Image: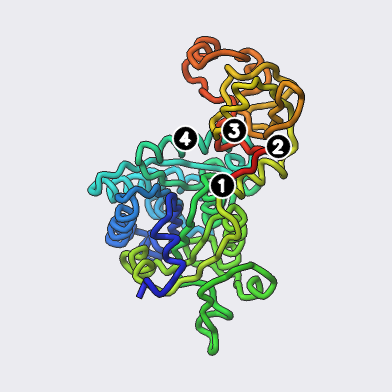
Amino acid sequence: MAAMNPHLARLRAARRVVVKVGSALLVDQQSGALNHDWLTALAEDIAALHEPGAEVMVVSSGAIALGARMLNLPPRAKQKLEESQAAAAVGQIALAGAWAAALQPHGITAAQILLTLTDTEDRRRYLNARATLSTLLKARAVPVINENDTVATDEIRYGDNDRLAARVASMMQADVLVLLSDIDGLYSAPPDRPGAAHIPVVERIDETIEAMAGAEGSAVGSGGMKTKLEAARIATGAGCAMLIASGRVNHPLRAVLDGARCTWFLPHTNPAKARKRWIAGALEPAGAVVIDAGAVKALMANRSLLPVGVREVRGDFARGDAVRVLDEQGRELARGLINYDAADAKRIIGLRSDEVARALGPASRTALIHRDDLVWTAPERQEA
């Protein structure tokens, strides 16, 4: 059955997957208690993806719903901001513990990551968040990510975990984003309306698709179909496929792989190309570095730019800014996101990695610009 759906190959072959879990699935809407059996089954599905080598991240709602029950607070829709933040403070501990307990029998370490909007919008914090997540994935941990509702206000919050999940998928160059929901995808009209048709694949989000989205959310969550379409725009724009599937079954990921109904949103590029196009064209360079012939060869071999190959630093930039990479004749070769501010970059010009550690401390990053944050712009070489 699953073999009949060509898009399932994306999930089976995915190198990096983000799974978003909504409050209405994880927390019983009547009692406010955690759905332990459902979480145990989902953890088995995650382990099945993780064991062959896929890197899995989870964006999990539920902290406020769990904390509200523990503090005897009213439902989220009736909470004041400070009540929601207090509920999150309590619920985040319970939520992290539940995920750790569910994944531990499979030999998987869970890690808690709390983000606010500025962590994916501000480039310095973006780089820090991405470096932390990359390190966790390299160690084969499963990061469990949630919005930091204890400190976020309306002005600095995502507002729902659909868009947070899409930002994480974009930031981490994920191949597939799975939104587990209380509905099995997009419909042409409300699913309980006669004649409503399920939409299995969306190749482009246009006005017709947008008109199909309603605004309603669940009692314990904050997202509706409109937020899912916004998430789809973010994810597919970053080269990541997205699917909406029902979480109202045990083993929801297994069900998708077995051919359960869902809606796929297809990207028109891959994550690496989308990210490099963003670096090359969407960011205004704040400075430049001049590199020697050896560094030019290293970059052409798809290596990171190390301080030892740098001859000059120009401009007043901050860590995370885009900079131009020039050869000694002044020609632009590449652009990238720099790991140091201008003052520190000037201190380590020409230094070997061990000398950088002595100059700036052992926590210093090895690369001035990591190869994942570098895009070749000179015409002599085209990006793969």
Q: Is residue 8 visible in this depiction of the protein?
A: yes
Look at the picture and state if 30 lies above or below 271. Answer: below
Q: Does 189 sit left or right of 180 as displayed?
A: right
How many labels were placed on the picture?
A: 4
Q: Does 23 sit left or right of 195 as displayed?
A: left
- Which quadrant of the figure has residue 224? bottom right
The disc placed on residue 22 is none
* Residue on which the image places disc 1: 272
Look at the picture and state if 104 lies above or below 248. Answer: above
SS category of the residue bearing label 3: helix
Which residue appears farthest toward the bottom when viewing the image? 194
Point 72% across, 44% down: residue? 281
The x, y position of residue 266, in whole percent, is 56, 64
Of callouts 1 and 2, the N-terminal one: 1
Residue type highlighted by circle 2: Ala
Instruction: Calculate the distance from the C-alpha at mark 3 to the C-alpha at mark 1.
Output: 17 Å
